[in-house]
Amino acid sequence: MTDADGPAKLDAEAKLLASHVQAASAAQRTEGLIRNPADAESAAAAFMRRIGFADAKLTSSGSDGGIDVKATGAVAQVKMQWTPVGRPV
């Protein structure tokens, strides 16, 4: 690479990086959508991991006593509200 190639290469790398950031941002927004009870449980487990419960995992479906997510030192029971909550605008 010559000195003349430097700015063009950096510009191409910056554009590539920006496209990756945009793709990751779009994926994160989509990942955060809660469409059904399983999505709600996954979101709860992800939230628990973000706040420090690194081993938060979904429990298997079946007789779990109402516990949907388990971690060392914490459990979560997740309920999804299908209808809007709050007063009408």
Image: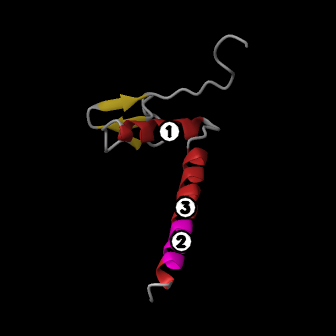
Residue at 51% x, 67% y: name it: 14
Residue assigned mark 2: 11
Residue 10, image x, y percentages = 49, 73
How packed mark 1 is, by other alpha carbons closer than 10 Å (few <14, some 14-19, many 20 or more), is: some
Could you tell me which secondary element the residue under label 2 belongs to?
helix
Residue assigned mark 1: 43
Which residue in the rendered view is the most extreme toward the top?
87
Residue 20, image x, y percentages = 54, 62
Span highlighted in magenta in the image: 7-16
| Residue 56 is a magenta residue | no
15 lies left or right of 59: right
How far apart are the two marked residues, 2 and 3, measured between alpha carbons? Answer: 10 Å
Q: Quadrant of the C terminus?
A: top right
- Nearer to us in this view, 25 or 86: 25
Residue 61, image x, y percentages = 50, 40
Could you tell me which secondary element the residue under label 3 belongs to?
helix
How far apart are the two marked residues, 1 and 3, measured between alpha carbons? Answer: 27 Å
- Nearer to us in this view, 59 or 11: 11
Q: Earlier in the sequence, mark 1 or mark 3?
A: 3
| Residue 11 is a magenta residue | yes
Residue assigned mark 3: 18
Question: As shown in the figure, which amino acid type bears the numbered disc 1?
Answer: Ala
Question: As shown in the figure, which amino acid type bears the numbered disc 3?
Answer: Ala
